[in-house]
Image (cartoon, grey):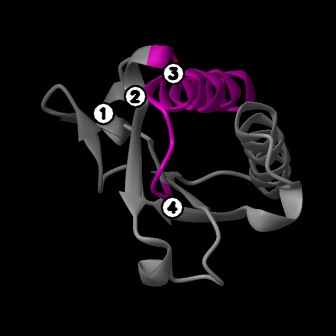
Amino acid sequence: MPVIRITMGKKNNVEMKKMLIEKLTSVAVEVTKAPTSVFTVFIEEVEHENMGIGGQPVIKVIMGKANVGMKKMLIEKLTSAAVEVTKAPASVFTVLIEELENDNMGVGGQTLAEIHHNK
């Protein structure tokens, strides 16, 4: 049940937000090889004065443990997808990855550890 949360300033149109959700999900599926159905994307719009990292967009991924290569690829591809959709420069995006143990998250009443074990 990986979660992608992007926090950004207000004034974004619905079509751009929809495209951003689709692109970020697509990148996460490509990199992790997990099915689309397990990803949740949240866009949180806040007033610019309420932004935490220099007033710039933050993409936070909450997921199970991943290797360094996968994390590097996620950071690169999520940033590229956000740039493509928003037309903002890559330098304004911060990507944070929070890793949880597979028994600390679940889908459909099962932990990810159970889901992986039952495959």
Mark before the other along the chain sequence, 3 or 1: 3
The amino acid pointed to by label 1 is Glu
Q: For numbered disc 3, what is the local secondary structure?
A: helix
Q: Position of residue 23 (x, y in %)?
A: 65, 25
Q: Residue at x 71, y 40 (%)?
A: 86
Q: Pick the quarter of the image with the C terminus.
A: top left
Q: Position of residue 117 (x, y in %)?
A: 40, 28
Disc number lying in front (2 or 3): 3
Q: Residue at x 79, y 50 (%)?
A: 88
Q: CA distance from mark 4 to mark 2?
A: 41 Å
Q: Position of residue 66 (x, y in %)?
A: 65, 51
The amino acid pointed to by label 2 is His
Rendered view: 35 above or below 105: above
Residues under numbered marks 1 and 2 in contact, where contact means CB atoms less than 8 Å apart: yes
Q: Which mark is residue 66?
A: none
Q: Is residue 88 left or right of residue 64?
A: right
Viewer-proximal residue among 37 and 107:
37
Q: Is residue 12 left or right of residue 87?
A: left
Reading the image, the residue beneath label 4 is 9
Residue 95 highlighted magenta (yes or no): no
The amino acid pointed to by label 4 is Gly
Disc number lying in front (4 or 2): 4
Q: Residue at x 70, y 28 (%)?
A: 27
Q: For numbered disc 4, what is the local secondary structure?
A: strand
Reading the image, the residue beneath label 3 is 15
Reading the image, the residue beneath label 1 is 114
Q: CA distance from mark 1 to mark 2?
A: 5 Å
Reading the image, the residue beneath label 2 is 117
Which segment did they paint magenta? 7-36
The amino acid pointed to by label 3 is Glu
